[in-house]
Each structure stands twice: as C-alpha cells, then as structure tokens.
Image (spheres, coloured by chain):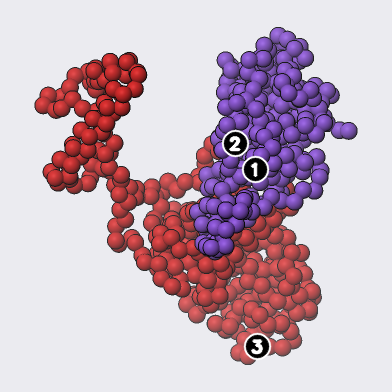
Chain colours: A red, B purple
C-alpha cells in the first residue's frame, strides 16, 4: 500500500488563539450578513427557520459549547506532506521520480474489472518474420521457454536468475552469454535444465555463444558438445553485432562445426521475455492490458489506461496512463516511450509518480529504469549505454 | 436514402449532450429532413424541456417498449417544424426499465419512418449508455475542452470500439477562445491529441444557449448566436457537406479589432494536456 500523502487535519497542530478569535469574528459577521439579507427579503419562513437552528445529530448540545453552525473556515485543507527522505529533487538529465515501494498486495492482480479490449488477430507474440535485421539463415522458432514461476527456494531463485541472464532466445535458437563470474558447472546445469524442459523443441536448434567476455576452455567445449549431442544441437560463437563466418575463428576460442548451417547469422539479443506482445493500437482510458512478458504498443496509452507487463513496456507514442513493468517483481524491466508522461509508473515492486515541480516532460524519447532502488527517467540516448 | 441512427454521447455529464441532440435534430429538420429525437435518459429526462415540448407528453418511450401504446401515439410533433418529432423518456422510471434488445427493436422501427434518429444518451457507462448505442449507426461524442471530460470521452471511445461501432466523431462544446488564448484552457489540438478521432463540430460557450434552454427553443433558431451557427454547421457536416472549421477567435466587432490592435494576443503558454 502506498503511504498516504495527505495528512489528516487532526494531526496538524492546534492553531493559535488569535486565529481562532479571528474566525469567531468572521463567523459572527457572516451571521449578521445572513440575518440582514433575510430581513430584507420577503421570506418569512426563512426567519422562522433560523429561530430554531438545527441541533447536532446527538440530539443534545455538548455542555459548555456555543450553539453555532459549523462554519466552513473550521474545515482545514489537508496539507500534502512528503517526508524529505523520499523526496528526490528532480535534476537535469536523469529525472528521479518520487519512488515508493509497493506492498505485497500490488494492485493489478486479479480484480473483477474487465479489460473491454478485443484482442485483434494483430496482437500476437512477435513472430520471427517481424525483425528486419536478421540474416538469411532462419532456424526454427525464436521462442525459448519462459522461466517458470519463482519457487520459494533460494537456490532455485538464484538458478532462475542465472538462467535469465545466461540464456536468451535468439532468432536462430538459444543465445548463451558468458560472463567472467560464472561457474562453468552452474552454466552447464542451467543449460541442461532449460533443454530438458522442452527437448523436442530444441532438436536441431542452434546455440550461439557469446564469448567476448569469457572464452571457453577446450575441456569446456567438450563438455558442452557432450551436453548438446542428444539434442543434435550445434553451437557456434558470435559477437553480438558482427557477421560471423563459421570458418573463421575468433582468437583463443574453440570451434565447433555447425550442423549444416553455413550462412552467417546475426545473433540478436532478444529480451528476457519469450513472447513479446506487439500491438498497433491506442490503449484508451479504462482499458487494461495485462501480459506476462514484454509489450510493445504502437500508439498512445491514454490517462486512465493501465498496462501491466511481466517484462519491458515500450510505447511508441505518448504514455499518459499507468504502467507497471516487470510485474510482479522484476526490477530489471524498463519502460520507454516517445513521450513519457505517466500518471504513475511502476517497475517491479517500486511505484513512482512524476516530479511535482510542474515542469512539462521533455519532448524526446525517454526510458525509465530502476537505479539504486529508485526509478530514474532519462533520455533514451543517455540511458542507452548502461543498458545491456 | 438510407436512414441513419446517430447517438450523442459523452461519458461525462453536463457537457452538452442534450443541447447537442436537440440542436442537431432541429437543424437537420430545418434542412428538410424527417428527424426524430429520442430521449435515452430515462428517469432524468431533459430533451423535452430543451425542445419546449414537456407539456405535450402523453406517452413515453417506456410505454412504447412495454406495449402500452403504439409508437405513433408517443411521438410528439414539434411546435415549430413539421418534420421534427420527439420520443420522450419516462420520468418516473429508471434506466433498467428498458433492455438493449428492446431499444434495438425500437431503433429499427423508427428507422423505417424517419431519415434521422437522434438519440440523446445519458451520462455514464451503464445500462443507459448501452441502450443508447446498441442501435446506433454513428456516434457523436461531445466533450468540453477540459481534463475530466476528455478523460471520460476517452473511456467512452474505448467502449464504443469494444461494442463494434464505427469510429465516433467528436464535437467540442463550450470552447472559450479567450481562455485558450491565455493558455488556461485546452485548445482543439490538445483535445485531439488525446482523443485522436475525427472532428465534426466546434461550439463556443454562449449565453444564448442558457437563454434558449430556459425558453424551450433550441439555440439554432437564434440566428445571431455563435453557438447556433456552430450547431448548424455541425448538422451540415453530418449531412456530408464540407464546411470549414469555425474560426472561433475571430474579432466580433470593431471594438474587438481595435482592442487587438492595441494589445496583440500573447503567445499561448505551454499547456498540460
């Protein structure tokens, strides 16, 4: 539950007696004015009504208090108070959104409301044919298995986290990214688990290895080959933006002969999500789009609309509504839009709202992500370097 | 010629649906078409008062739907125009008195007798709204150039799309060019940026509307009023005519021109959509 931002009037300090006196005088004046008006007007019944002012609901006046009408001046306007710790000053460049953690009961979980949206046939997981950057050699489908729900076990959690970072779906199969810190046995374990999840799917597929940061030892190559043999999977090494000719070796790495695929392929780093929802429509107020992985919306998200995605949210248009990326707990998710002006922005378990200095958001594409436990918004160009 | 059923809706209350429905019907009838105005706001009927026909009501829409009278008995001919009729709502019932199916059948019946069926939709998104759009061929959304009504209009557009109706048209009502100039009010482009549908009319804020409502005479009959002229233009656009969009900020008279000469208009400040 978001911490309430409005202070109750009772929490405010009692006002000084001078002010109270002033209020009493004002009340008396307003009474005089009303009486004067009523005397001048012709309404006799109004005068009689005033002679017997209405009692309080209790039926009896509390002892010692004056018989008076409650005046509007008594009702104090609640003051918006934000604890300084949470308030981050908006800075030029990256804008820190006022971030607060969401409770466990994050809204957006099962509610009675209907989405009112007809899913047209156009909304389908991003098919392999969609990407224009691909090289010619197309292997079987891009989707890899979505990481299953997190289990309570800690080890399972870390393994899943590793699996997410390590293995990604690419157009031609799986992409394995090796970082210096990884333990090889764990890598193999994760890979084996993933392959075992859907053996027939990976049959004959291609495993691309990103070994720019950490090369493979010859023994490791052997182990990998052994693991992949029952699936008849081939693997080869790639740099992420280079055309790779399998006949040419990057230095220091072992090579494996790809099974029948000799055309160079670009290994595209697909996002974590297995299936991305791609839709070309504007999400109107009152509509809710829920999806388990990433969402690309070519259109606006209007105020009053909600987008809840398990992965990233990309709005090719103006984002004015509420968006929750990385639901329920993935804080690596990002939200980008051509014009980012949401009512509320949530990533993982953090919720935030735009800075209240009243400045209009800049009219350039921006990206929101979590940095140091806070949601930060920066222009797309500035934020790009830090992104994988 | 094919009959057309137009529903005037908005989502938000008080933006001018009944005024628009009354004036569009009257303007279309003034152009020679056979028009019936249907009040869909059961329980809070207003269309009869705006058209000045409240004392002529014997039977109403709920009576027709429940079979207590014939449709012809409930239709009220307008005082001034021979081709304009009104089907009033009931005041003593509420919106659950009529179902969507009944409303659809009623629209079919009316379509056979009239060129235009203009339905005044109640505020909200519940049964009253659903009844009003079920028989519609075209929907006109009325909105004011301010935040809450634009947001509600957006919601309505979503519901209309979900109901499978064609894309609605927009009529922006109660525009105040002086406020727009100062940057205190959303202007037409701001509204269209959010709603992104076609525009069919721009109507300025005009005291003549209030006077006309109280008198029971639709403002299109007042030739001097700007709002009346705008509603007439909107009706012409509904008929398919290509009418240029109103220049609402044009100087009204010599004094206005002089005033603008002396102090030219400031640039519109940045606005928050």
Classify 10 Å Cα crowding around label 1: few (below 14), some (14-19), many (20 and above): many
- CA gap between label 3 and label 2 equals 81 Å
Classify 10 Å Cα crowding around label 2: few (below 14), some (14-19), many (20 and above): some
Q: Quadrant of residue A52?
A: top left
- CA gap between label 1 and label 2 equals 8 Å
Front tag of 3 and 2: 2
Residue at x 67% of width, y 61% of height: A143
Q: Position of residue A110 (x, y in %)?
A: 52, 41
- CA gap between label 3 and label 1 equals 77 Å
Both on one chain, marks 1 and 2? yes
Q: Position of residue A239 (x, y in %)?
A: 64, 81
Residue at x 57% of width, y 23% of height: B44
Front tag of 3 and 1: 1
Q: What numbered label is drawn on residue B208?
A: 2
- Describe the element under mark 2 as helix, strand or loop: helix
User: Chain for mark 3?
Assistant: A
Q: Quadrant of residue B93?
A: top right
- Does A139 sit left or right of B150 as displayed? right
- Mark 3 = which residue? A250
- Mark 1 = which residue? B226
- Describe the element under mark 1 as helix, strand or loop: helix
Q: What numbered label is drawn on residue A30?
A: none
| Figure quadrant of the C terminus of chain A | bottom right
User: Chain for mark 1?
Assistant: B
């Amino acid at each position: 539950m978001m911490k309430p931002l409005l202070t109750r009037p009772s929490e405010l300090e009692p006002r000084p007696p001078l002010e109270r006196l002033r209020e009493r005088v004002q009340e008396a004046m307003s009474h005089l004015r009303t009486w004067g008006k009523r005397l001048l007007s012709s309404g006799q019944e109004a005068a009689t009504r005033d002679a017997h002012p209405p009692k309080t609901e209790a039926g009896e006046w509390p002892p010692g208090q004056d018989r008076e009408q409650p005046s509007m001046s008594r009702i104090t306007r609640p003051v918006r108070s934000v604890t300084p710790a949470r308030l981050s000053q908006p800075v030029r460049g990256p804008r820190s959104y006022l971030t607060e953690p969401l409770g466990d009961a994050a809204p957006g979980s099962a509610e009675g409301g209907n989405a009112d949206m007809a899913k047209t046939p156009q909304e389908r997981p991003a098919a392999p044919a969609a990407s224009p950057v691909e090289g010619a050699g197309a292997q079987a489908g891009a989707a890899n298995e979505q990481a299953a729900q997190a289990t309570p076990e800690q080890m399972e959690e870390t393994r899943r986290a590793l699996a997410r970072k390590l293995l990604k779906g690419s157009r031609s199969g799986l992409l394995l990214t090796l970082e210096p810190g990884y333990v090889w046995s764990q890598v193999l374990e994760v890979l084996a688990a993933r392959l075992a999840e859907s053996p027939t799917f990976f049959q004959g597929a291609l495993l691309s290895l990103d070994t720019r940061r950490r090369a493979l030892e010859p023994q490791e190559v052997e182990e990998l080959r052994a693991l992949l043999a029952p699936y008849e999977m081939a693997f080869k090494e790639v740099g992420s933006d280079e055309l790779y000719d399998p006949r040419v070796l990057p230095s220091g790495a072992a090579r494996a002969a790809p099974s029948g695929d000799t055309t160079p392929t670009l290994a595209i780093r697909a996002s974590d999500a297995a299936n991305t929802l791609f839709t070309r429509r504007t999400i109107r107020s009152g509509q809710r789009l829920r999806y388990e992985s990433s969402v690309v919306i070519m259109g606006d998200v209007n105020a009053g609309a909600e987008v809840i995605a398990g992965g990233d949210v990309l709005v090719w248009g103006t984002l004015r509504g509420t968006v929750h990326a990385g639901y329920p707990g993935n804080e690596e998710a990002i939200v980008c839009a051509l014009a980012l002006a949401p009512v509320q922005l949530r990533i993982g378990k953090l919720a935030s709202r735009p800075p209240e200095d009243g400045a209009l958001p800049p009219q350039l594409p921006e990206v929101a992500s979590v940095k140091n436990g806070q949601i930060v918004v920066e222009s797309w160009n500035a934020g790009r370097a830090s992104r994988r | 010629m094919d009959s057309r059923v137009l529903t005037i809706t908005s989502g938000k209350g008080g933006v001018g649906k009944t005024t628009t429905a009354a004036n569009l019907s009257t303007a279309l009838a003034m152009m020679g078409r056979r028009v019936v105005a249907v009040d869909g706001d059961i329980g809070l009927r207003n269309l009869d008062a705006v058209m000045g026909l409240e004392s002529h009501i014997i039977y109403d829409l709920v009576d027709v739907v429940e079979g207590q009278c014939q449709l012809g008995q409930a239709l009220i001919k307008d005082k001034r125009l021979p081709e304009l009729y009104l089907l009033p709502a009931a005041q003593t019932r509420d919106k659950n008195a009529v179902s969507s199916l009944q409303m659809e059948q009623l629209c079919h019946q009316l379509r056979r007798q009239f060129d235009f069926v203009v339905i005044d939709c109640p505020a909200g998104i519940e049964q009253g709204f659903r009844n009003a759009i079920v028989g519609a061929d075209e929907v006109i959304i009325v909105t004011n150039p301010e935040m809450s009504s634009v947001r509600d209009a957006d919601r309505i557009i979503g519901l209309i799309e979900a109901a499978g109706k064609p894309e609605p048209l927009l009529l922006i009502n109660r525009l105040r060019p002086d406020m727009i100039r100062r940057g205190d009010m959303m202007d037409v482009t701001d509204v269209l940026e959010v709603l992104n549908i076609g525009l069919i009319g721009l109507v300025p804020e005009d005291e003549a509307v209030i006077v006309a409502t109280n008198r029971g005479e639709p403002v299109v009959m007042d030739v001097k009023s700007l709002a009346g002229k705008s509603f007439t233009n909107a009706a012409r656009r509904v008929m398919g005519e290509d009418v240029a969009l109103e220049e609402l900020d044009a100087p009204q008279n010599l004094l206005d021109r002089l005033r603008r000469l002396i102090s030219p208009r400031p640039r519109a400040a940045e606005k928050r959509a």
